[in-house]
Image: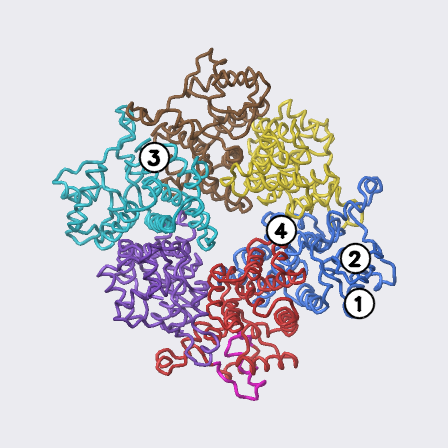
Chain colours: A yellow, B brown, C cyan, D purple, E red, F blue
Amino acid sequence: MPKTNKSAKAAGKTVPVKASQAMPVLRAIKGGKASTPKSPAKPGPAKSAVKPVTAVVADDAPVISLNLTPAKLSPAMAAYFKKCQDRLGFVPNVLLAYAFDMAKLESFVAMYNELMRGDSGLSKLEREMIAVAVSSQNRCYYCLAAHGAAVRRYSDNPLLGEHLVMNYRVARLNKRQRAMLDFAVKLTASPWSVEEGDRERLRRVGFTDRDIWDISAVAGFFNMSNRIASATDMRPNVAYHGQAR
Amino acid sequence: MPKTNKSAKAAGKTVPVKASQAMPVLRAIKGGKASTPKSPAKPGPAKSAVKPVTAVVADDAPVISLNLTPAKLSPAMAAYFKKCQDRLGFVPNVLLAYAFDMAKLESFVAMYNELMRGDSGLSKLEREMIAVAVSSQNRCYYCLAAHGAAVRRYSDNPLLGEHLVMNYRVARLNKRQRAMLDFAVKLTASPWSVEEGDRERLRRVGFTDRDIWDISAVAGFFNMSNRIASATDMRPNVAYHGQAR
Amino acid sequence: MPKTNKSAKAAGKTVPVKASQAMPVLRAIKGGKASTPKSPAKPGPAKSAVKPVTAVVADDAPVISLNLTPAKLSPAMAAYFKKCQDRLGFVPNVLLAYAFDMAKLESFVAMYNELMRGDSGLSKLEREMIAVAVSSQNRCYYCLAAHGAAVRRYSDNPLLGEHLVMNYRVARLNKRQRAMLDFAVKLTASPWSVEEGDRERLRRVGFTDRDIWDISAVAGFFNMSNRIASATDMRPNVAYHGQAR
Amino acid sequence: MPKTNKSAKAAGKTVPVKASQAMPVLRAIKGGKASTPKSPAKPGPAKSAVKPVTAVVADDAPVISLNLTPAKLSPAMAAYFKKCQDRLGFVPNVLLAYAFDMAKLESFVAMYNELMRGDSGLSKLEREMIAVAVSSQNRCYYCLAAHGAAVRRYSDNPLLGEHLVMNYRVARLNKRQRAMLDFAVKLTASPWSVEEGDRERLRRVGFTDRDIWDISAVAGFFNMSNRIASATDMRPNVAYHGQAR
Amino acid sequence: MPKTNKSAKAAGKTVPVKASQAMPVLRAIKGGKASTPKSPAKPGPAKSAVKPVTAVVADDAPVISLNLTPAKLSPAMAAYFKKCQDRLGFVPNVLLAYAFDMAKLESFVAMYNELMRGDSGLSKLEREMIAVAVSSQNRCYYCLAAHGAAVRRYSDNPLLGEHLVMNYRVARLNKRQRAMLDFAVKLTASPWSVEEGDRERLRRVGFTDRDIWDISAVAGFFNMSNRIASATDMRPNVAYHGQAR
Amino acid sequence: MPKTNKSAKAAGKTVPVKASQAMPVLRAIKGGKASTPKSPAKPGPAKSAVKPVTAVVADDAPVISLNLTPAKLSPAMAAYFKKCQDRLGFVPNVLLAYAFDMAKLESFVAMYNELMRGDSGLSKLEREMIAVAVSSQNRCYYCLAAHGAAVRRYSDNPLLGEHLVMNYRVARLNKRQRAMLDFAVKLTASPWSVEEGDRERLRRVGFTDRDIWDISAVAGFFNMSNRIASATDMRPNVAYHGQAR
């Protein structure tokens, strides 16, 4: 398939961004050793006999349902993809989806990292909890799979991940975290109805005004990402499903 | 008021980001001449006698209802604010709102400019039309005021701006633009329900897959911005209301 | 066009009620001098050169999308139309829309005037505020344009008009007016859920039972008018858009 | 009780509009013989022994939950009330509710009669069908009871009345009437979404543009009445429940 | 018609479950005398002349819109149908609808009787009140007709039945019953939002935890039945409409 | 803990149905060896060191939030529980929840088994797919966990389970199964709107009328179970989360 892909590009045809398609890019970055992401959920040999990898991939490929030609990665993005590959074992599909345009990819990565990994009064787990609760309200498959895994990983509590994916109200949260998710979900479902009383509820459980900005910005960001993912039929890396169960 | 503000900052107290408060920052940039934005909707002398500027400002101040201390503008952002001031006559309040943190401000500005002014199969007017239709669905005051003005300006058709603010279905659009807004509004109201059929409808009126990405990304972006604006009670610059009527 | 119209009527054909079509009626009333309503939003000569009146009218004509023949105005209605023309500079399009049937026009005018201009514990501005908040909930273009202008005019506060058009929750209202609009909007969105507790909230901010009737009747009336306007694609007079900015 | 009522009025106290309260008015009209409306649903003597009239009245009294003093009926309204009493055996409670103000009562009666009994391409039954379908969407007790009875009476088909009260989609309607109710219910539930395609659907089953106006106006009227009834907790005359079963 | 039906079955064709079709079954039970259910709402001879029984049946036949062959009744079910016939004068159509499969019919009857007639802290009337409030939220014609009649019968208060069918909020309920219906309707409309606070509200008005189970189970059961009835277009026995008016 | 529980029961106090509480019952059935359900998702020793079982249980215990005393299992139900324990390794919590009353437990088990395991034109997998799609619409944690696992197991496709839990529209289904889930979800979200056209769509993809009954009955059943689970805060067995990943 790399071959086909190459010739398609040579012929000037656009081709869909598929997980498999991104491999040549990764290969270049990694020095030729494109490792197929291992599906960590199915370790047993008996089972993988029954359901070969190709069947699974068919369910969640291509990465998006738009026919966009991957661009050449900028040096910064090539380095970033390599870092993902090294740390996670794969490049998150959302990055492959954006990789048709370096300016878009870079502004997405900059905002994402600033929000989710930058300095904040919210812990990384709390930011991921907002991501999942918002994505559940919007029923976004990509973000639920990817960030549900992150909640399981950061919390070391697989149940919490499932609670937030299915209905955050069943999670046994402290007052602070419950207020945080109530605000994020209300902001998602009916942004027009958020008023000073809602901000006051956050302050009463100890959030600063800067924290309120961060809750709002993370909730806002996933309202954007959920929609881009749904609009393009974005598919999560298979690896997420089995992480930290 | 600048004086009061300075002493508050000297005392180490955080102060809310207000239109008036941003002035010292602008003053520094502009060399001390903080011009009050003129309200272009009320040119007559008789009227401004009846309703002085202070009354109007009271209705839409401060910029946001969070108490955040403005940070020192980075050189890039100082230059950008100056450019806004020169071109528009004011710095859009959304920038003042983000100005408590340079990393956040810069990633917002980068994404915004890439999306709304970068290369695209969608005209700038079309991107602004999406912004307004989405913001109307979400009843976002800030974005309706600011981008409603942009639609009036880019289209040179004040009615179109009003149509999109009030109910985009009353606008007399061609098939392409109607399909574009139908997609953006469905993606806003029920993102989970967007499927291949919806993308097909866009392709049938001539949009490429790259265009579909751009429609989705602009709609997604304003679903983010609408929520940050509602969550923080962000107020538009008064100047927008009278532009291009 | 008056000529065409006349001959169409002579031939027994119904013709759509258009702004232009109403002119012969007005001409008769006014003694032959049918003045085109001036668009007050665009006073400058430079601009009207760029965008001629015909372009604007094409966006908001005809008055309704039903093909109804104007009836001969009754003496009372002819006098009323003349009064409108004299006072406002134009006859509101809703009256032209009803003018195919004198009984309907007269009962509409009677109810409208009794409600909006008759004796009440609510000020005229408050009644217009209800009209706009209800029409915003129902996203009714005609009523938002016409009554948004009325709020700007009566309040001498253009921002208040924009707030109510876009999201009444952003307006800085006193408790009485906020309770009034909360009641009107709840009654609009889910009338089945209004109960004694809702009436009590109005009484607590000082409204009498007679005032509660009036709030309900005005909110009810615009729930009717919004639907007739949406059902018939009713278009507001262009003049409204620029009033009292 | 008439006595009590009189003295209350003499003392300048406002009293609630109750069914019982309207009796003095009716007495004057009828020459002193205020007949208690017979509950036609319970003709048997055994049963009325078990559940006396007072128990039933307690469930649906007073007429509204606002404390409004009945005004003196104008001659026109006194005649109209008498006509109701003679023809129906009672004065509909909605008229008693409005009877605190003659101008309001008269404009309501004029519009109601013009719409529901005036000349139209819609039969009286069809207009009542719209009234019930709209009132069911809005879950309006008063209008469902009163106009449900009217549908049973005009159609001589008690099942049709029940269908429309409970879910108009179960009624076995011809295409014309189904399209009519689909339009009226859509206009009720989401007026902003009604467009030319909806009008075209009505035209395709034979409705004229004048008919479309009438469907819209009746649907609009009950969207008003439903809200006034819900806002004031208006209670239907007990007699309606048993009519035409 | 029994004859036709018989020959259809002889020919091995499936036939829809209709009221008329169930007659042979009933005939066997009753010893050959299949009595047509009398429409109790129309006792007068004058009226039935105008609207013959066949017209009424046409509006609510067949029992469901699925073409299912009635199975041979098991002895237990034959006895149960006979008991219904003796006690009510007819077999409820829901039982005829399930009678194509004895296992399904028996499990439905067992659960229904356990829930609605078994031991409970809720009175039978209260359970029927829940049934109607839930069915009104779901706009289920079958259940509103059948259980609306049951509320009228058990309460000996026809108004209560109408209130619950049309909008339970207008019923004059004590705190216990209002809290019960609020819980049941919230559980119907947004089950995901029910939490400990909702259960606490029930406990505060005196319900035990066992009662809360029963309220939930009855509300749950009618959320099932409403959907089976709507999915199959199930029609209630005509007799219900006139009961206990 | 069994000891505490015993003494509580000896003292005549009701105790909540908890996973731990059900153990004595299971112990009796199994001859004294109450095996703690192994959490199959966390096989590694390193991890269980980090997060002990008690922490996990605290997140999903007790089984329900109602304080109900377990009844003595009837012989049939004791045998059924033993069968569950043998086959699944645990007794599903929903059965423990119902075990306070044998009549309720038995009617639930009878209906459940008839529907989900009885003869049908729908495969067991298809019935589980309906269960999950309905439960996702209703955001029911218990049913999503338990039946999501069943879909993964029956389909041998973990992705399918995740798709249906998160948004069934992203699953790559054939036309038959997509139509089946569209019907079930519409019936869940707006049962009043299901009509003959919806049944026709099922027939067109090959479903018989008997199949339509079964789709409706399964969808109906989970609309019941979802609500009982949400009303009682029912918690799934931890084991489900890791099954068939």
Q: Which residue is mark 1?
A: F79
- Does E21 lie within the magenta span? yes
* Residue F21 tag number: 2
Q: Which residue is mark 4?
A: E197
Q: What segment carries the magenta color?
A: E13-37
Parent chain of label 3: C
Contact, CB < 8 Å: mark 4 with mark 2?
A: no
- Find residue C155 and name its label: 3
SS label for mark 1: helix
Please state which of residues D192 and F167 is positioned toward the viewer in this rendering: D192
- Calculate the distance from the C-alpha at mark 1 to the C-alpha at mark 4: 37 Å
The outermost residue toward the top is: B31
Name the kind of residue labelled 4 in the image.
Answer: Gly
Query: Which chain contains the residue that carries disc 1?
Result: F
The alpha-carbon separation of the residues under discs 4 and 3 comes to 43 Å
**Residue occupying the point 61% across, 36% down:** A204
Q: Amino acid at mark 2?
A: Gln
Residue contact between numbered discs 1 and 3, judged by CB atoms under 8 Å: no
**Does label 3 lie on the same chain as label 2?**
no
Say above or below: F222 vs F168. below
- CA separation in Å, label 2 and label 3: 67 Å
Q: Position of residue C77 (x, y in %)?
A: 19, 48
Q: Say yes or no: labels 1 and 4 on the same chain.
A: no
- Under mark 1, the amino acid is Ala
Query: Alpha carbon of mark 2 to alpha carbon of mark 1: how far?
Result: 19 Å
Using the rendered image, report if marks 2 and 1 lie on a common chain: yes
Q: Residue at x 54, y 43 (%)?
A: A189
